[in-house]
Amino acid sequence: MVQSKSIRALAILQATSITGVAKSVLEFAQEATISRSSQPTVDLSIVLLSRSQEENNFAAAMQHASVEFDVILERRKFDWRTIDELRALVGSKRPDIIWSNSVKSHFLVRLARLNRSSRWVAFHHGYTATDRATQFSNQLDRWSLRAADRVLTVCQPFARELESKGVRANHIRVQHMPVRPFDVVNSDRRTKLRAQLGIAEPAMVVLSVGRLSKEKGHEDLIRAFQTFLRRTPNISARLVIVGEGPERSRLMLLCERFKLIENVKFVGYQDDVSPYYSIADLFVLPSHTEGSPIALLEAMAAGIPVIATNTGGVSELANHETDALLVRKHDIGELSDAISRMLENADLRERLRFSARKVVLRHTPSEYYRSIVSVFDEALSA
């Protein structure tokens, strides 16, 4: 264990909104301001790679939280000047640890040979292959990550995948995402939101939060919800989908085809999701692939019973029938049955809600901070 009282760390990431990777880095930055006698403190600098000069939601959130950061403006998809700017920044800040948080940042660290002057911890969050360029970048990642002193990833399946691509097993550490307990949303705000969405009492609310892309499985959810409504006419329910993405138009056309325009509400991306959690009776994560889904942890932290597909690291966060109902991905019938079972059984919802609150205590930002710092220490000791 390194005995230094302070670790200088430089986090590099790309982010425009406060989701996933960006949220976890922001949580770490806020925890780094808290003094801890049992561990080294972390003097954290953040570098945001951006394609636009306009302030984005993540930059605004860091400013609001008084977190200092630098922006490197990329003039095109791959800008060679970025390498020189990164080298200059590393030279001025002289970090002990470079902490990369995206495929592109991993690649830039190795290409610029930044790991020759600092130890390198790379955080792998999984791949979403949407086009050939992205697939090519993902392939380059196996070259990048082999050079890191430690590689963090969000679940055991991802760890096995990394090992199969040549990353040394003794360099890989599994790290789940953090979640902070939600503040209580007052009843007036909940009432106002239901009115805005046109959801009158006593209709129940089924909530899903996530990017509207194919791998998130929203089409499966809409089909399962349509089956549920047809088979269970005695229960009044609405599906609220929070998120934006390339599948939105197609999903809305599917709702028109199924005559679900009044039953399914698309509300787009939301900076603050807590009001939507506050009106939900059930949360559904229908993804085809996941790592350590923050939306799942957020729903559990908000005290909402959960149905999720058993994919990626979901079963590492929640046990079937104990903390949530887990169903097979792509199985629309099983998902529909789970929705029916959950909305018809108040005792089941309460039992899962109670159990889920205990689960999230293992994934607090303070625990996340301690775990990341221990990996920093490992890299420095290597």
Image (cartoon, rainbow, N blue to C red):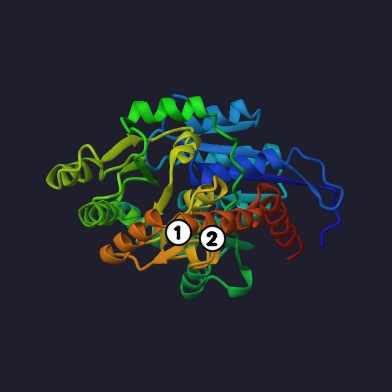
Q: Is residue 81 left or right of residue 220?
A: right
Say whether residue 56 is visible: no
Q: Is residue 88 left or right of residue 96?
A: left
Check contact, mark 2 vs mark 1: CB within 8 A: yes
Upstream in sequence: badge 2 or badge 1: 1
Q: Quadrant of the N terminus?
A: bottom right
| Residue 21 in the image, given as x and y percentages of width and height | 52, 47
| 363 w.r.t. 191: above or below | below
Amino acid tagged 2: Val
| Residue 7 in the image, given as x and y percentages of width and height | 77, 48
Q: How many marks?
A: 2
Judging depth in this view, the residue of 36 and 203 nearest the camera is 203
| Residue 114 in the image, given as x and y percentages of width and height | 60, 50
Characterize the local packing of mark 2: few (<14), some (14-19) or many (20 or more) Cα atoms within 10 angstroms: many
Query: Mark 2 highlights which residue?
Result: 154
| 65 w.r.t. 207: above or below | above
Query: Mark 1 highlights which residue?
Result: 126
